[in-house]
Image (cartoon, helix red, strand yellow):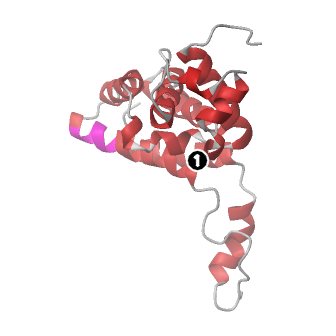
Amino acid sequence: MRDQPLSREAIVIAARRIADADGLSAITLRRVAQELNTGQASLYRHITDRRELLALLNDDLAQAFPVPTGGTPRERLLAQWLGAHRLLLEHPWAAKVIVDASSATESAIPFAEAAMATFAEAGLTPETAAHAYRATWHLLIGHVINEHPLGHPGFDLDPARHPALTAARPHLVSADPAAEFEWALRRLLDGVLGGHR
């Protein structure tokens, strides 16, 4: 017996639970219906198909992206992008939904607007702010999607042929994802903002 009436919100919450536990591929309408203790046909009164469900998941996630308001522009940018990275680490499936253009959502606009406005407040022109936003976005998504950099375990390296990679390998495979992203983000912002703070 369901604890609450069936709704789009309940369906999205159930889908998020499934994705968090078993990954994006585990989300099927049948599995969501089982999670909600209902029949699959009941879901069709609220959503049309799996594609719409993934779009709703993306919308739900986008609403959770941080939009900091206090501090200097640089502090706000750090808080915004570090917060987005934490959110995506909490939901490892999410980056794959985000990069699917078919699930684009207007709920992501406040995040983008805040970032662009903060880059502008830091002294960047609209063109440079756009480059900075794109670079920071790609850094974020790349760090979440790329689970192992070049030199990950699984390949034997010949130190004589690959001395630089052999020396760096322990640092490539043992990096803390949050610390690694923060290191890269700080350096990207240092380069983009320059003397602007």
Q: Does 99 appear in magenta?
A: no
User: Can residue 194 be seen by looking at this rendering?
Assistant: no
Residue positioned 39% across, 21% down in the render: 110
Q: Residue at x 64, y 61 (%)?
A: 148
Quarter of the figure with the N terminus: top right
| Magenta: main secondary structure | helix
Left or right of 20? Residue 74 is left
Q: How far across and down, in percent of the image, does residue 162 sit?
A: 64, 85
- Identify which residue, 120 or 102, lies in the foreground: 102
Q: Is residue 167 visible?
A: yes
| Image vertical order of residue 30 relative to residue 183, above or below | above
Q: Which residue: 60% across, 22% down?
A: 11
Image side of residue 67 versus residue 162, left or right: left
Rendered image quadrant of residue 85? top right
| Residue 64 position within the rendered picture, expressed as x and y whole percent measured from the top left | 54, 22
Q: Which residues are magenta?
A: 127-132
Q: Is residue 45 left or right of residue 120?
A: right
Vertical comparison of 65 with 133: above or below: above
Q: Residue most toward the bottom?
A: 160
Q: Secondary structure at mark 1?
A: helix
Q: Amino acid at mark 1?
A: Val
Q: Is 129 within the magenta?
A: yes
Residue toward you, 17 or 179: 17
Which residue position is annotated with label 1? Answer: 144
x, y (%) of residue 14?
66, 25
The residue shown at (72%, 49%) is 176
